[in-house]
Image (cartoon, rainbow, N blue to C red):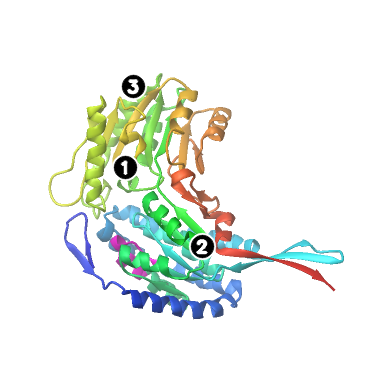
Amino acid sequence: MKIINPATEELVGEVTVDTTEQIKAKYEKLRVGQAAWAVRPLQERLDIIIKFGDIVDTHVDRLANLLTAEMGKPVWQAAGEIKGAKNRIKFLTELAQKTLAEDWVTPDGATKEKITFEPLGVIGNISAWNYPYNVGYNVYLPALVAGNAVLYKPSEYTALTGIEMAKMLWEAGVPQDVFEVVIGGKEAGQTMLDLTLDGYFFTGSYRTGKHIAQTVAHKLVPVGLELGGKDPLYVAEDVADVANVAAAAAEGVFYNTGQSCCAVERIYVNEKVYDAFVESFVEETKKLKKGNPTEEGVWIGPLTRPEQIDVIQQQVNDAESKGAKVLLGGKKMEGKGYYYEPTVVVDVKNDMALMQEESFGPVIGIMKVQDDAEAIRLMNDTEYGLTAAVYTVSKERADGMMQKLNAGTVYWNCCDRVSPYTPWSGRKNSGLGSTLSTIGMRAFVQPKAYHLRG
């Protein structure tokens, strides 16, 4: 399998795809290794993960350059993502023991009762290419701490990154019969679905997530799906500084070249500040440096998947044909690489593809609204429900709006952020279950109830 640099279209490297037999053999090895891993003290497992974080810290520059070569993320953003291991591991260090400890719910009386939390067993983690380190951390770190073995398949677009993660986990002390990496594309993923795994955890598109859920439904094992979004942002007329809000919104739109499940993909602006916001947003977008993602200060790198250029272009063309106006960009950039110009579209309507279908690229539609009620109605008018953001000076006003927004995560005066302390969960087509937080940690264990007399 060839790994192509999306910025240069040159060959980065080649990897050998695992056969069905090799994947099955890895699974069988994990089935044996998990039993021994699960009986090791939780603190011992946690110490190994802490050591993994220390190893990652010593290789940030090398790992960032590898990630940039594979999927085109600006290298300074790649380094920031890799360092995300720190806050995940800090969270586990602080709360894993408490979250996974046995819970004596009835410690007194003739019949004592307690709950314990046992690992699921051997889980499958089919991961994504847009944030391969972080979305991997979100699953395999708490899963390993909880005593599971992990069969990990990185995206075919970031296979080299996946191999490096496995090496560092093994170096830290995770046994090779507890964490294994599967290399391949759709066929390898399908082989994993055919195995008798004890849980499936996927990050990616709604279409693939739905296929996974339907394929494994008969097994009645836990399924966690972290899927896409069409995340809205609303700007109220009372914002203190329109230009600052426009700058924050532009960062939410264009970070990682728009290739984030929680990127801002729709903006609604109160009519009283609409013109000022649009003017500021366009100016902010013009400032974003485009080019080779290895260069300092570059914000807009290539798209990882060349076919996404056609998806975005079709959305822009559809919007224009229905009366929208492109203020900036609107076409593929010339030259080598899978580049698309940062694009701003106004006079949009909510039924346009640009406002309904996931774009996953450097494009945004901005729509004028009369009031908060219209904004809420339009923000909820979507098949997705991952995140939603409200910008206003009034906390009371923001609280009222956020309570009415049908999304797993809501933001007041911020956007496009993730914390290991809060659950990452989607509604509707944005996913099933949660990662992160103590809720996400317990996704990798199963409770057992004890009723004790004597």
Q: Nearer the viewer, residue 115 or 274?
A: 115
In the rendered image, residue 38, in percent from the top left (x then y), is placed at 57, 75
Q: Where does the image place residue 319, in percent across and percent down from the top left?
A: 26, 31
| Badge 1: residue crowd in 10 Å (few <14, some 14–19, many ≥20) | many
**Amino acid type at image mark 1:** Ser
Could you tell whether 249 is left or right of 293 in the image? Answer: right
Q: Is residue 395 above or below residue 155?
A: above
Q: Magenta region: which residues?
A: 153-164
Which badge, 3 or 1, is on the more N-terminal residue? 3
Q: Which residue is mark 3?
A: 275
Q: Is residue 87 left or right of residue 73?
A: right
Residue 84 versus residue 424: which sits nearer the camera? Answer: 424
User: Where residue 302 sits: x, y (%)?
Assistant: 23, 50
Q: Tag 1's secondary structure?
A: loop
Precedes in sequence: disc 2 or disc 1: 2
Q: CA distance from mark 2 to mark 1?
A: 32 Å
| Number of other residues with Cα within 10 Å of mark 3, as a class: few under 14, some 14 to 19, many 20 or more | few
Quarter of the image for the N terminus: give it.
bottom left
Residue 162 magenta-highlighted: yes
Please indicate whether residue 356 sits to the left or right of residue 149 in the image.
Answer: left
Give the amino acid type for the residue marked by disc 3 in the picture.
Asp
**Residue 259 position in % (x across, y down):** 33, 48
- Disc number lying in front (3 or 1): 1
